[in-house]
Amino acid sequence: MAVSNAVDGSGGRGSTVAPWRNWAGNVTTRPARSVAPASTEELAAAVRAAATDGLTVKAAGTGHSFTPAAATDGLLVRPERLTGVRAVDRAAGTVTVAAGTPLKHLNETLAAHGLSLTNMGDIMEQTVSGAVSTGTHGTGRDSASLAAQVTALELVTADGSVLTCSAEENPDVFAAARLGLGALGVISELTFAVEPEFLLTAREEPMPFDEVTGRFDELAAENEHFEFYWFPHTGNCNTKRNNRSQGPAAPPGRISGWVEDELLSNGVFQIACAVGRAVPAAIPGIARISSRALSARTYTDIPYKVFTSPRRVRFVEMEYALPRAAAVAALGELKALVERSDFRISFPVEVRTAPADDLPLSTASGRDTVYVAVHMYRGTPHEAYFAAAERIMTAHEGRPHWGKLHTRDAAYLADAYPRFGEFTAVRDRLDPDRRFGNAYLRRVLGD
């Protein structure tokens, strides 16, 4: 087990551990010490030692949350050695994986076994535990978030004991810990439901804002996975429809795929965002050009190569989950807000869907959901735009993504989630001393 700490000149425990920063760079924390366990046993020992020393404990993934969910001045558990696929059970249709395994590694390993997750988000840099614990999701008519695909998990609790949880074993903990915000303990391994690998055909196509919102119910119902991006300051959107295919595989050409996914979506977009940050008045014109740069295309490939794409331009993000019936109205209000304001928004607004699920803290808990995500280029003032967008979302009973920027607190969230009290009761039982607490959890869960 790799441990990092220091002793100061007075004989006390020092604080020379390097600070930890998230991917966007908007969260920095300096833990008293950090540890990189390679096994469940090493993780449990680290939690027990932290308890003896009176330290709080938080696990960090790859930092793709924009909230300080992983921030701690106590013990920081790093993920890089707690990795690897531990078991593949074809008969049961499951794969068991260590908590620190990056989604990219999981997807590549599943593909090597001819298997796949049913649905996933649009990036795969996160650890499996970080993605599950904050509610990472893709878009789907019938298939839900990563956490909803978990069938079992292993959890190290506040006293260093290890709980195995599933629908049959510790079912109340399982229900809460599949999307647990790190509030119940540190997940050491996860078991996902998987299925034989299949092909998806992606159809990407520009579409006017009025058409896509006017046909939204139709497009969401007719496609297994539908999403779209609206470019603020324009009436233009780019839509994406992913549906299962009998094949054959027809991935994007090497050069054309590079042009779309790297040159335009990352390289040119990075330059456009940098210009917009330096000269905000140029943003509407840049947006009109950007919204027309991506052409229609169709391609067929294995799931993770269709669902995910590289995201190299750094940004900050806020995302709200809305009741399905409220989505079009909220989008119309957001568009009107941009049109009447002085905001200059260089990033598109992303819209995705999810079916209702049964996880207590899932943003889709108990209701069919549409996600609306707003972004700003890193280093650009975002507070006023996000605050105005948040007022629209909360007026429509929105639930904020746990890993993305928002200002909601426990009082709001207890009303937004019918099973909120069920989750906090499990937390009170497993972690009464708040060994896994931090300022973010105090705000969103109460204390």
Image: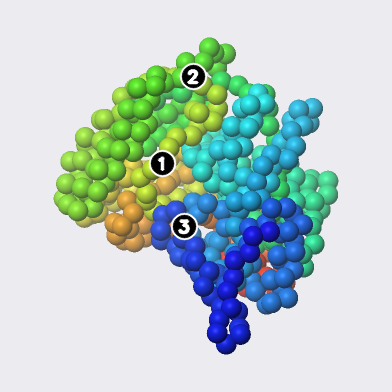
Q: Which residue is mark 1?
A: 311
Q: Which residue is mark 3?
A: 22
Viewer-closest of 173 and 26: 26
Side (left or right) of 396 relative to 176: left
Residue at 83% over, 49% down: 169
For badge 2, the amino acid type reads: Thr
Of the two numbered discs 2 and 3 on the same chain, state the one appearing first in sequence.
Answer: 3
Q: Assign a secondary structure to mark 2.
A: strand
Q: Residues within 10 Å of mark 1 (few under 14, many from 20)?
A: some
Residue 212: name its quadrant.
Answer: top left
For badge 1, the amino acid type reads: Arg
Counting from the top left corner in percent of width and height, residue 319 is at 45, 50
Q: Can the viewer see residue 152?
A: yes
Residue at 65% over, 23% down: 114
What's the CA distance linking mark 2 and mark 3?
34 Å
Count of marks placed on residues = 3
Residue 182: name its quadrant.
Answer: bottom right
Q: Which residue is mark 2?
A: 300
Camera-side mark, 2 or 1: 1
